[in-house]
Image (cartoon, rainbow, N blue to C red):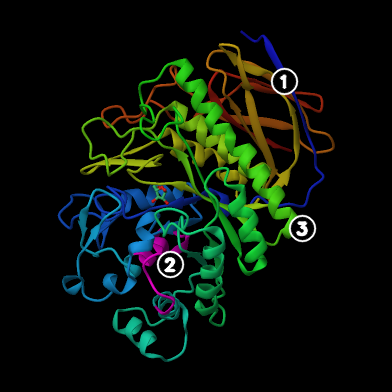
Amino acid sequence: SYGQTAKATISNDSKLVISKHIYGQFAEHLGRGIYDGFWVDKNMPVKKQDRIRMDIVEALRKIKIPNLRWPGGCFADEYHWRDGIGPRANRPKMVNTNWGGVTEDNSFGTHEFLELCNLLGCEPYISGNVGSGTVQEMSNWVEYLNFDGASPLTNLRKVNGHPEPFKVSFWGVGNESWGCGGNMTPEYYSNEFRRYAAFAKDYHDAKLKKIATGPSDADYNWTESLMKNVGTRMWGLALHHYTLPTGDWKDKGSATQFTEADYFKTMQNCLKMEELVTKHSAIMDKYDPAKKVALVVDEWGIWTNVEPGTNPGFLYQQNSMRDALIAGTNLNIFNNHCERVKMACLAQTVNVLQSLVLTKKEKMILTPTYHVFDLYKVHQDARFLPMKLDAPDYELNGQKIPAVNASASQDASGKVHISFVNLDASKDITIKANMGDINWNNVTGQILTSAKLTDINTFEEPGKIKIAPFSGAKKEGGIVSVVLPAHSVVVLELKN
Ligand code: AHR
């Protein structure tokens, strides 16, 4: 049915840029994210550089991932960087207490991570240990990474094979310091941030962008306190918000088996991101009207129950068409808030939570979420185009959510891209988008959809959900008329 029509008005009137760092990623020492994910056994029959899996690297290069956050997560606040440098055979082992109690052999450490970023062509984002570390330990790590002169630490870096400074810029001062990172109050953490940050130095052309532990979900008091007590001493304030299908941490819901009512509830929870970003931004505006401090959504995505039969501490979950709609919706929200949201990291890239890539021994598949990042890469560092959207509701059992969400940008070559998500499970929606004074002649598009919301890509059928050409858009004078199929993500390209 083409029964529903929505109106959009797109404006040319903005100088804001959608930072490419909104399309960032997060990879923790957790389950099969690093070990048996990015970093595999030397006998694994796949193309490797050292032990880095190159099929994953190539897939991620294709979608231009701009940054990678590491080593955690909760793991960051029990990680001691010196255990992960030098000859691998001599590296001490430790227990990963947060994630399955497994033994961490530290074979993937600082140099391996930075080599991975180098291969990916992305910027590293390192989270330092505040919870169980020391100021000196963090200060030394920064010197080891970034100092370009002679010092015992830079000599050690040379001995370990890297004479040049790494010039790491994104720097997390702890992680979830209100929880697994140390159970601190916002006032206590603010002081800790100030102390740790004071000794995490800028070295010549390696200036740190320090990112503070921010609020969990709707903890507005945390944001208020950090803005008051830390303010522009931080480059960014992190926000963590996960989409839980049921909303209940004890039983989050299945990744693959859900009804339309479950799906509807999941999308209600997903759309909370709009409210969270808006309200945290409003608090930040009070203390920082010039918008110097970035809101960094460095953990987001759907978090379901683990796949049956897998280690509950490993957070391995499948990825359905529903996940694609969640990714498209969150990315539209971040794009539309690009004045404040300058960075975000999906949790967690490979084999953990809402992954881009899943692996099984030497096999690798790309998830529906991967394809959304592929479709949306055109927004990276493009000029933001504000949009007014007047969309119908998607109604189920007397409840409503907006059926469509969207964002738009113009790239350096003048091409305009509009990303639409139709959340309605069963109805097509027609959009008439007025392009105002934007010059364009021709519209093409790409679509991601599937027969069922529960559809997934599997190792047996890896291409079930994939990007396809889209022919549902046409020019009607200055208006783009587009029919968005039910539960689909569509990205249009308008050019002369
Ligand atoms: O991403 C999984 C975990 O979620 C992270 O380790 C932690 O920061 C958050 O609670």
Local SS, label 2: loop
Res 19 seen here: no
Return the mark for residue 130: 2
Which part of the image, by quadrant, shows the C terminus?
top right
Q: Nearer the viewer, residue 151 or 7?
A: 151
Which part of the image, by quadrant, shows the N terminus?
top right
Question: Of tags 1 and 2, which is closer to the observer?
Answer: 2
Q: CA distance from mark 3 to mark 1?
A: 34 Å
**Rendered position, 188 above or below 363:** below
At horizontal 36% and vertical 54% (from top left) the residue drawn is 28
At horizontal 22% and vertical 44% (from top left) the residue drawn is 362
Residue 240, how many percent across, how many down? 51, 47
Amino acid at the residue labelled 2 = Val
Q: Nearer the viewer, residue 38 or 106?
A: 106
At horizontal 28% and vertical 41% (from top left) the residue drawn is 359
Residue 491, how many percent across, how many down? 60, 33
Q: Tell me the residue that label 3 is attached to.
A: 289
Amino acid at the residue labelled 3 = Pro
Local SS, label 1: strand
Q: Is residue 117 magenta?
A: yes
Residue 301, how many percent across, how many down? 47, 40
Q: On the image, which quarter does residue 3 sit in? A: top right
Q: Nearer the viewer, residue 97 or 368?
A: 97
The answer to whether the beta carbon of the residue marked 2 is less than 8 Å from any atom of ligand 1 is no
Question: Of tags 3 and 2, which is closer to the observer?
Answer: 2
Tell me the magenta residue range: 113-136
Q: Tell me the residue that label 1 is attached to.
A: 6
Question: Which comes before the other along the chain, label 3 or label 1?
Answer: 1
**Rendered position, 90 above or below 399:** below
**Rendered position, 469 above or below 259:** below
